């Protein structure tokens, strides 16, 4: 790097902080000093190491006498501060840091200024409990509509600036309507507002918009960004997560109902552990399941911890504005978050079952009410009884048939199971793994309902899971027999009957007796064949009135033996051919009727709705250990649930919540939303501010730590956070407070003086213009052309995606459905979010990255956006719809059509120049390019939808 | 851009990143994009379009100016192509104790599948190449072979992400994104990071393989097609002529100009106006870039455009050359798409699979190397060849020649861009099952690419999620010195 460049950097580093300051402000330890120490000194003198006895990560340690007898930092005394002497030393064996480039002059100046000023070691603002100050006094008290204005104006006045003039009514209405609903105001709404001269006209609009269902759709999307919402899991299959959309709907409903934020957080983290939250409490915990996960990870243990990391990252950044995730492998380099903090946070989530789609552990049935649940339970019970009764009658006839057969014919394969499926796995094990957590190589129905390992594609290192239904003919005692090479497990009706695990040969059969009720019971066998040797699986059973029969396919030996006894017959074939003779025509007819009745019954299971949700392994999760260097193979100290140390810490008291989960998540949730927590309310108040002003008071909404931005108005943030909590954590009053302020109602017009003094608008001397978000672009186009379908909720929709885009998929088109044109015209928040293929019009305009929490979206300007807006099918189709609407609603007069076009898109009455320009375009296209009047109007509409004025808000 | 939101990240985070060592000039570029210099400095002359892909200075003088990554998706077998294993001769079907890990899980023994092709020595360096690549074999003196590559995953989904973005999890920017982030593009009429897919479809995980992850979409790969409109939405819709679109654009520009007049301080509005002009120019330049009719017959023949087998990949190799000539920084070509035998994933019949894919690509790849060389472009064009992993020495199934995935050891190669030709580095064991001598994890390959492009892999960072993220990860990673 050239000297010039490095000077440039130095100048730039100072710039944003100096740009509005008149005299040098005192050094800010956290912002200016700690990062230097962290970057250049901590490696040897920090949380991990204390060479020479020096640690620079804690104040008391930095000022201690060192092993050398010297002191690293002596307040106000540069001469005796060993830190500075070593940094400045010209002696190579003496100088610090011993490796890498020397500190820059700027860094040295900062350090010496800091020491000179008294080496104040000030705690970072975010870790200090907020102090709520009254709104400050201001000179221009007339401008203050509510305390927000006082905080803003006070700073402006101190810097010799004044707020911009009020925005004109039209700009304000458009800004407000978009901010609260994500849509443009309709011409009727514009007219009503412009005509209403009463002082409360604006407030009435605010109230109307906050009551609109569109509000929840707009603000839910902001939250969905934070929680990395998507409907699929990424990676090779990028398969749909079952019912993820219910979580999205829950968020929309919660915003519309103005659910208190503390409740909203509690439900997402621990709704299942809360009494009285009903189905919402279950759906909300879908929060845990929204992230990406690999269904076929190379390293399963690492993947498990990657899953925890995703939850820790999202919760700590999302709820607390802290990057706890940075402490996975070592203590946080800058913030006072230790590695123990990270694993403490993990311990709250330790009991969560792994992801899966499908996986019964990530879904639960949900009901609108307790009555609905009771009704469902009864229906299910009745259904089951009916099935069992039918089965009993079938079994009885089968027994009669069998008893009447000659001895020879009794040598037959009678299927005592049905609906048998197998899953085949390949890997090397020495004990049975948890097959449910692994991806099967093949999943298929067994042609014949016997446990059969012959579909294995290799001789060793594989496994099988068989799942089916056992037909128990009568109540009574049954004996099961399992012999296998290698390990196996037999499970009947959810209970483990026989475990014959490990590497071993056959010859040590395991027997178990068990009482079973008549009926159809789930049966399952897990089996694996180790790295070598023979393979075999034999399962048999006997019971009241029948001798031992095979449940597994016969081994070659068995087949030979049976063949020696005579020709084996297949029961099903035999019943078909000889049933009518042996049983009599009527009885056989009854048998076939019963069989088809059973098939019908199996199909009409009582329906329930399911939600993607969290589940735990039980009330006592596995122990949590600190993983050295983040490596799951290197567990260190045992960790118990403890709250984050920078926020006060303390061992968690875990409530008892019943048999399904540990209660730890509820403890964490309660701690996060306790009024004493110094971050939660500030973080959310900041997010609400952010989406009204385009940026937070803290510009890094997910990072309130030392690497984040300092708040431009800390006192205001604390005041807002306090008002938020005092108002019962309700969001709508906070919105109202903000949008009723004069700060919000300022014009976006520039002012030369202010722009020179504060080009970044740190002080809010005006309202910042903003571009529409991706969803706002798409939804506005649909709103303007009149096609927007306001239907709410339900499974994600699939707007058409071109074949060119689908060609990028490994199986073009897979995982993207087809919705009706009406469905396709619904709001963007309802579009199915497929991680590996986001709807182009949304991704073009900077849709949130779905793989990690998105605190603030990018706003890029690229030629590819222009291409999509000019040539893309969606825009051209919609432009044609727009033109259709104009012809329909504005009558035959072209001038009126053009006028209405502008009014709908830009929300105001166009002036003559604007209209004439549109008319000229239409005229030219017809005269010069031979277009029809309709085609020309289509092009005019396309032009309007491309206007900056359409895409930007003042 | 409204100064409020620094591309979604905060100014402080960007500045932190500069403290972390990102080059000053790149920083200046970014600040400029943010309108940092705009209001006062540019006020007088009016705002210009600020292109985040504007060319930026590298960290140091680069050896390579551009990269062509020939991605052999599915995982070609190293021991059947460039990693000669004479010790396996005559051992077909022998049972052997060898630890393997692929989609079929872990195994401790297996049945040897002897390499199915003959190897010969080529060039002055005498490197052994199998009969699968007779054309590439003639270029070995320009190639540096990396015989000891390793990766974290032998499963396509995560392994593809690792080869493209350095991580087994999705959400991180790809190599091409990093290069464009670090260097920008020198032709604003074309995308800086171009991906050309196999006609059978994209690779597994689709767009995740050219995603810019947590970086702005500006740095993501753009799909360029060899048939139809080269870029999505590039051609005007049916019934719209270019002249007609110009009329629309003129009206749009004039109307936008009026809107801008009272908002002149907002450079984003001007940038957006400009982006339409750029798009219009792109419509002209991109088709020119992909128009192969101006290439001589000899050139077309050299790339195999006269042969249906090599036509598609040959076309794309030739396009790659035309694109890098026009300033595209990073071009990635996929050989193979979709699933199973539509790519190099030879689980069933190894011979059929590899004969097919090598036969489709061998001549075009050699032509690309030779063509670049004859145009004196090979010296500063880095060509990378390889898949997301290699294949096992033993059979996957009880019968047949199919090989499962192998991330314990495999071969990739580089040519041009300052890489020493005729060299080989690292070895696998006698079966090719695992890298034994100087193993190189994927991150070393990435470090080497960045280094050749003049970027310090340990300095090129992007602040995200509270961390200075780097393509090569947290720990210091040196480029592979032996080949540069």
Image (spheres, rainbow, N blue to C red):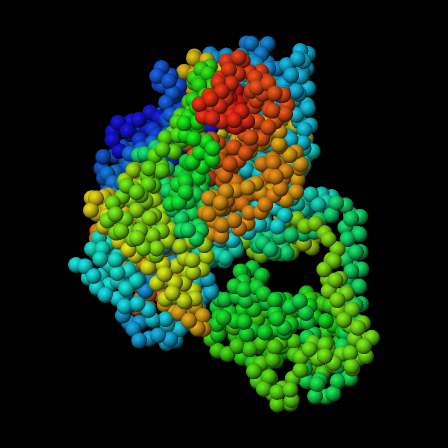
Q: Residue furthest left?
A: B124
State the image quarter where residue B291 is shown: top left
Query: What residue do we see at 49% from left, 45% from top?
Result: A803
| On screen, residue B239 above or below A25 | below
Q: Residue at x 52, y 40 (%)?
A: A839
- At a point 56% along the width and 73% down the height, the residue shown is A453
In the figure, residue B380 lies in which quadrant?
A: top left
In the displayed orientation, state which residue is furthest to the right.
A586
In the displayed structure, does residue A850 sit left or right of residue A517? Answer: left
A342 or B80: which is nearer to us?
Answer: B80
Q: Which of A893 and B212 is in front in this view?
A: A893
Q: Position of residue A900 (x, y in %)?
A: 59, 20
Instruction: Pinpoint residue A169: horizontal percent, then vertical percent.
Output: 59, 15
Counting from the top left corner in percent of width and height, residue A795 is at 63, 44
- Left/right placement of residue B242 relative to residue B291 reads right
Can residue A349 be seen here?
Answer: no
The foreground one among A626 and B274 is B274
Identity of the residue drawn at 60% across and 80% down: A554
């Amino acid at each position: 790097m050239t000297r010039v460049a490095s000077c440039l950097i130095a100048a730039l580093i100072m710039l944003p902080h100096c740009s509005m300051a008149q005299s040098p402000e005192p050094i800010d330890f956290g912002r200016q000093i700690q990062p230097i120490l962290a970057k250049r000194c901590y490696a040897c003198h920090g949380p991990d190491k204390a060479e020479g006895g020096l640690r620079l990560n804690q104040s008391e340690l930095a000022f201690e006498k060192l092993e050398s007898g010297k002191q690293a930092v002596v307040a106000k005394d540069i001469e005796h501060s060993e830190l500075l002497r070593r940094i400045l030393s010209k002696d190579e064996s003496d100088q610090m840091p011993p490796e890498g480039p020397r500190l820059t002059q700027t860094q040295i100046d900062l350090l010496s200024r800091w020491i000179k000023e008294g080496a104040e070691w000030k705690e970072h603002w975010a870790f200090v409990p907020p102090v709520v100050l009254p709104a400050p006094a201001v000179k221009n008290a007339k401008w203050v509509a509510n305390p927000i204005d006082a905080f803003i104006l006070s700073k402006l006045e101190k810097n010799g600036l004044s707020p911009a003039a009020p925005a004109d009514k039209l700009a304000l209405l458009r800004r407000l309507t978009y901010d609260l609903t994500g849509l443009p105001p309709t011409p009727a709404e514009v007219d009503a507002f412009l005509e209403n001269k009463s002082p409360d006209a604006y407030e009435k609009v605010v109230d109307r918009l906050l009551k609109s269902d569109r509000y929840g759709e707009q603000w839910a999307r902001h939250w969905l960004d934070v929680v990395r919402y998507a409907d699929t899991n990424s990676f090779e299959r990028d398969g749909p997560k079952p019912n993820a959309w219910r979580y999205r709907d829950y968020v929309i409903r919660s915003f519309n109902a103005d659910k208190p934020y503390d409740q909203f957080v509690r439900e997402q983290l621990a709704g299942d552990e809360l009494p009285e939250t009903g189905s919402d409490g279950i759906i909300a915990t879908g929060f845990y399941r929204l992230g990406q996960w690999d269904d076929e990870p190379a390293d399963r243990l690492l993947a498990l911890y990657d899953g925890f990391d995703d939850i820790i990252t999202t919760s700590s950044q999302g709820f607390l504005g802290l990057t706890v995730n940075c402490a996975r492998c070592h203590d946080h380099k800058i913030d006072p978050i230790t590695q123990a903090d990270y694993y403490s946070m993990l311990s709250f989530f330790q009991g969560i079952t792994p992801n899966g789609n499908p996986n019964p552990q990530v879904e639960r049935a949900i009901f609108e009410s307790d009555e609905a649940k009771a009704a469902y339970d009864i229906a299910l019970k009745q259904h089951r009884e009916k099935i069992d009764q039918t089965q009993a009658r079938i079994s009885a006839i089968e027994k009669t048939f069998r008893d009447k057969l000659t001895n020879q014919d009794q040598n037959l394969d009678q299927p005592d199971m049905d609906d048998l499926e197998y899953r085949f796995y390949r890997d090397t094990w020495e004990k049975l793994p948890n097959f449910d957590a692994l991806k099967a190589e093949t999943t298929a129905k067994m042609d014949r309902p016997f446990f059969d390992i012959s579909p294995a594609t290799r001789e060793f290192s594989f496994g099988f899971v068989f799942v089916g239904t056992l037909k128990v003919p009568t109540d009574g005692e049954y004996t099961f027999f399992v012999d296998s090479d290698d390990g196996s497990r037999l499970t009947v009706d959810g209970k483990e009957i026989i475990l014959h695990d490990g590497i071993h040969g056959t010859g040590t059969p395991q027997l178990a007796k068990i009482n079973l009720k008549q009926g159809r019971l789930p049966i399952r066998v897990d089996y694996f064949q180790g790295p070598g040797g023979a393979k075999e699986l034999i399962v048999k059973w006997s019971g009241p009135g029948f001798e031992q029969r095979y449940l597994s396919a016969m081994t070659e030996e068995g087949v030979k033996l049976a063949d020696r006894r005579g020709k084996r017959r297949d029961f099903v074939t035999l019943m078909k051919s000889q049933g009518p003779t042996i049983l009599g025509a009527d009885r056989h007819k009854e048998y076939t009727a019963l069989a088809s009745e059973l098939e019908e019954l199996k199909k009409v299971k009582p329906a329930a709705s399911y939600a993607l949700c969290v589940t735990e392994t039980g009330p006592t999760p596995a122990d949590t250990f600190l993983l050295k260097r983040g490596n799951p193979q290197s567990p260190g100290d045992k960790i118990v649930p403890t709250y984050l140390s920078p926020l006060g810490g303390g061992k968690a008291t875990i409530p008892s919540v019943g048999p399904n989960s540990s209660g730890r998540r509820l403890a964490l949730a309660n701690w996060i939303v306790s009024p004493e927590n110094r971050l939660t309310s500030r973080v959310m108040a900041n997010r609400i501010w952010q989406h009204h002003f385009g940026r937070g008071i803290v510009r890094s909404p997910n990072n309130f730590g030392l690497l984040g931005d300092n708040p431009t108005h800390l006192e205001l943030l604390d005041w807002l956070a306090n008002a938020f909590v005092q108002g019962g954590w309700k969001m709508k009053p906070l919105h109202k407070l903000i949008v009723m302020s004069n700060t919000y109602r300022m014009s976006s017009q520039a002012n030369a003086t202010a722009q020179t003094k504060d080009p970044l608008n740190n002080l809010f001397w005006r309202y910042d213009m903003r571009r529409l978000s991706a969803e706002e672009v798409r939804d506005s186009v649909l709103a303007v052309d009149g096609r927007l379908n306001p239907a709410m909720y339900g499974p994600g929709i699939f707007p058409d995606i071109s074949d060119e885009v689908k060609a990028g998929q490994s199986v073009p088109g897979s995982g993207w459905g087809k919705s009706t044109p009406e469905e396709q015209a619904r709001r963007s928040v309802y579009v199915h979010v497929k991680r590996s293929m986001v709807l182009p019009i949304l991704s073009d305009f900077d849709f949130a990255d779905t793989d990690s929490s998105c605190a603030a979206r990018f706003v890029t300007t690229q030629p590819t956006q222009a291409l999509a807006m000019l040539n893309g099918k969606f825009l051209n189709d919609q432009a044609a719809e727009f033109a259709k609407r104009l012809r329909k609603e504005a009558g035959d007069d072209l001038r009126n059509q053009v006028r209405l076009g502008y009014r709908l898109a830009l929300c105001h009455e166009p002036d003559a120049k604007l209209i004439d320009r549109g008319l000229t375009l239409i005229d030219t296209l017809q005269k010069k390019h031979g277009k029809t009047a309709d085609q020309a109007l289509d092009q005019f509409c396309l032009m309007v939808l491309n206007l900056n004025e359409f895409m930007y808000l003042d | 851009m409204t100064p409020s939101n620094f591309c979604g990240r905060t100014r402080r985070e960007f500045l932190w990143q500069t403290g972390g060592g990102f080059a000053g000039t790149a920083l200046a570029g970014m600040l400029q994009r943010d309108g940092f210099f705009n209001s006062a400095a540019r006020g007088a002359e009016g705002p210009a379009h600020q292109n985040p892909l504007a060319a930026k200075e590298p960290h140091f003088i680069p050896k390579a100016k551009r990269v062509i990554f020939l991605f052999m998706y599915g995982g070609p077998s190293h021991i059947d192509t460039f990693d000669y294993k004479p010790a396996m001769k005559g051992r077909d079907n022998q049972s052997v104790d060898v630890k393997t890990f692929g989609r079929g899980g872990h195994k401790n023994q297996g049945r040897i599948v002897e390499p199915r092709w003959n190897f010969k020595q080529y060039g002055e360096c005498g490197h052994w190449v199998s009969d699968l690549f007779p054309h590439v074999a003639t270029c070995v003196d320009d190639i540096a072979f990396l015989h000891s590559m390793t990766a974290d995953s032998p499963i396509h989904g995560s392994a593809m992400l690792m080869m493209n973005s350095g991580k087994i999890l999705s959400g991180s920017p790809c190599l091409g994104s990093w290069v464009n982030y670090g260097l920008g593009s020198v032709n604003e009429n074309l995308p800086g990071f171009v991906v050309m897919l196999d006609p059978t479809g994209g690779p597994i995980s689709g767009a995740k393989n050219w995603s810019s992850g947590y970086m702005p979409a500006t740095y993501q790969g753009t799909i360029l097609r060899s048939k139809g409109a080269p870029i999505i939405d590039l051609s005007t819709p049916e019934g719209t002529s270019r002249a007609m679109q110009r009329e629309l654009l003129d009206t749009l520009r004039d109307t936008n100009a009026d809107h801008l007049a009272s908002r002149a301080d907002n450079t984003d509005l001007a940038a957006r106006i400009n982006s339409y002009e750029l798009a219009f120019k792109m419509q002209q330049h991109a088709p020119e870039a992909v128009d192969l009719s101006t290439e001589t017959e000899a050139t077309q023949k050299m790339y195999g455009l006269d042969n249906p087998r090599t036509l598609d990949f040959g076309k794309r190799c030739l396009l790659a050359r035309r694109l890098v000539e026009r300033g595209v920084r990073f071009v990635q070509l996929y050989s193979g798409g979709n699933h199973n035998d539509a790519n190099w994933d030879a689980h069933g019949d190894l011979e059929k699979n590899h004969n097919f894919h090598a036969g489709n690509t061998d001549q075009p790849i050699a032509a690309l190397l030779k063509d670049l060389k004859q145009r004196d472009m090979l010296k500063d064009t880095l060509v990378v060849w390889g898949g997301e992993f290699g294949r096992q020495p033993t059979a996957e199934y009880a019968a047949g020649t199919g090989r499962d995935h192998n991330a314990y050891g495999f071969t990739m190669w580089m040519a041009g861009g300052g890489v020493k030709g005729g060299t080989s580095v690292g070895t696998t064991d006698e079966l090719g099952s695992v890298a034994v001598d100087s193993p190189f994890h994927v991150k070393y390959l990435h470090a080497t690419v960045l280094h050749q492009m003049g970027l310090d892999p340990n300095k090129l960072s992007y602040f995200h999620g509270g961390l200075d993220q780097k393509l090569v990860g947290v720990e210091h990673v040196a480029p592979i010195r032996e080949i540069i």
